Amino acid sequence: MRNIVEFKELMQHEIPECPVVLTSEGYKLDGQHGIKSALRILDRNGGTPKSCDYLQPYKDMLLLVEFSDLAAQHRRCGATLETLNLTVLSRSERNRVEDRLGAEEEIKNELRDKIRDTDFILREVNSRQMLEGLPDLQVCRFHIFIVWHPSDNPLEKYDTARLLDGLRLKLDADISRCLLGYFTDVPVHFLTVEAYEARYGVS
């Protein structure tokens, strides 16, 4: 059996445009050396579930932390839409395609899947007693943090902060329809890397 302390590390946001160096430590869930891979957790079809980046103990809470380069995702989605010739479609069809392929929909779906699968991973770890030192997940208060960095390019045609207004509501609605063990009615917060470091970094 592995011990959770093996997965404790200085957290990395991996957002190239962001100069902030984090000082908080968390248990790494994702990646080659994270809990998910080390314990070889698979779903019923033998696939590898998605996961958020870190589990961070904070006071009497456990924070589920996902670092997201929302600006880069927004750029990628915009570039994809620009390659399509939507002028041949009616206005309603064009709007439907833009909604399906737009940044808000892609980001929402990705975050929902990561939160849902992380819940599955923690249930597997706990029920199969795969990890020593794991906090008591039955009594822990969870908070989910989506941590992002605004674009440094003043010429960008979109405002990532504005994107979050609708995204938060849609993500909450999607999560409420998932069958979850630990993350039912858990609040989801969006905050910048700077705000996250100021509040949850080691002073």
Image (cartoon, grey):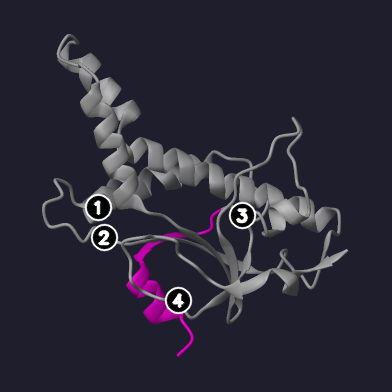
Q: Is residue 27 above or below residue 97?
A: below
Element type at mark 3: loop
Residue 196 counted in the magenta span: yes
Q: Is residue 8 above or below residue 91?
A: below
Q: Give the residue displayed 59% in from the left and 52% down from the top.
A: 184
Q: Disc 3 and disc 2: Cα gap in Å?
A: 24 Å
Q: Quadrant of the N terminus?
A: bottom right
Which portion, as a residue range, is magenta? 185-203
In this figure, which residue is indicated by the disc labeled 4?
A: 22
CA neighbours of label 4 inside 10 A, class few (<14), some (14 to 19), many (20+): some
Q: Disc 1 and disc 4: Cα gap in Å?
A: 22 Å
In this figure, which residue is indicated by the disc labeled 3?
A: 31
Residue 201 counted in the magenta span: yes
Element type at mark 2: loop
Q: Position of residue 5 (x, y in %)?
A: 73, 74
Q: Disc 4 and disc 2: Cα gap in Å?
A: 16 Å
Instruction: Name the amino acid, label 1.
Output: Thr
In this figure, which residue is indicated by the disc labeled 1?
A: 160
Relative to 147, is 151 on the left or the right? Answer: left
Q: Nearer the viewer, residue 191 or 48?
A: 48
- Sequence-first tag of 4 and 2: 4
